[in-house]
Amino acid sequence: MSSLKRDLDRPIQGSPVILVASNPSNPGETDRPSHQVRPSFHGHRSLRCVEHPRRRLAPQAFASIPCPHLRGESFPLLLGPALAKLGVCFPIRPLANGMSMVELGVNIDHVATVRQARRTVEPDPVAAAVLAELGGADGITIHLREDRRHIQDRDVLILAQTLRTKMNFELSCAAQIVQIACDVMPQQATLVPEKRQEVTTEGGLDLRPKSQELLNAIAALKNSGILVSLFIDPDDQQVHLAKELGVEAIELHTGQYAEARGQEQLSQLQRLQQAAQLANDLGLKLHAGHGLTYQNVRPIAAIAGMRELNIGHSIVSRAVLVGMKEAVREMKLLLNTP
Ligand code: PXP
């Protein structure tokens, strides 16, 4: 048992944290909007549903909560294993044309990168996750690297207890990290290659060797009821191998597309479209990510069957800039207020 598992099992007495309550009132009541997003204060105990009214209801009780303010319809609700344990649910939102929306997984690793640059406590990725959820994130992505260069075990532990959307846990196949994922039970785990010297994930997994480590990681995660996604290059052979390995989803690596320009970028987009088509044909859930920005994301979001995009660096970079004016204004005020 990892120490993280022991921490998860320990009863938590709560210092208050801000969270997004997606279904703040009595979930049993169907005559009022149930998906207002609002910030509120909870203690950790209530985050774990210890004192929450939902706790008395079985997870299935949330299987179809009407959302009258969302086009007056009832929406199907998906219950991930960890969310079901917590009694938390989230909607799958169909578009008017019947297709599902592309979900945004916000990768908050680089909030932790800034914190670790000073080995201090701020900015806290947990706070960033709350604000990302307030902004409409459909999920929060974190990569617990073996060298712990950004996300720390403590972040994983608190996020597991406080996220109101879903956790996409990125990890290498290293047994110790896989064990942590199995203990934390995120809704989704994305297996990625990891090299110590790299600045960020470089390239997708090469599934051809079908290494024992990879097979073990997939089996352990699946046995824990976690949806497994494999981060691969947009290559037909890799997509076929992902299917053979029995995973539910793939995340196509968009890094080469993001770095290319002009005609070369178009070719990279076509590569992604072709791999996406194959994934759709094989019944694999389709995700993509890496290097996506406000400038290059739209053609990727428009790929048929795209369900989820995981974006980090660009969003964190923009957040620093759009928040700078206010942060300086607040400091100026402190300096000049008696
Ligand atoms: N998807 C995967 C598998 C990743 O490894 C990363 C980077 O951690 C991302 C998405 C996000 O990439 P970026 O920070 O460039 O948006």
Image (cartoon, rainbow, N blue to C red):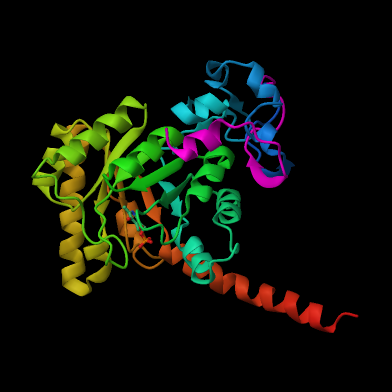
Give the magenta part as a residue range: 1-29
The residue lying at 33 percent from left, 42 percent from top is 176
The correct choice, above or below, for 336 with respect to 278 in the image is below
Furthest residue in direction bottom, as rendered: 336
| Rendered location of residue 166, percent (x, y) | 48, 39
Give yes or no for residue 103 being in the magenta stretch: no
The residue lying at 49 percent from left, 71 percent from top is 117
Q: Quadrant of residue 298?
A: bottom left
| Rendered location of residue 241, percent (x, y) | 12, 39
The residue lying at 36 percent from left, 48 percent from top is 170
Furthest residue in direction right, as rendered: 338
In which quadrant will I find the C terminus? bottom right
The correct choice, above or below, for 262 with respect to 86 in the image is below
Q: Give whichever of 250, 271 is nearer the camera.
A: 250
Give yes or no for residue 16 being in the magenta stretch: yes
Q: Quadrant of ligand 1?
A: bottom left
In which quadrant will I find the N terminus? top left
The residue lying at 46 percent from left, 33 percent from top is 92
| Rendered location of residue 292, percent (x, y) | 35, 62
| Rendered location of residue 89, percent (x, y) | 54, 29
Q: Give whichever of 13, 312 is nearer the camera.
A: 13
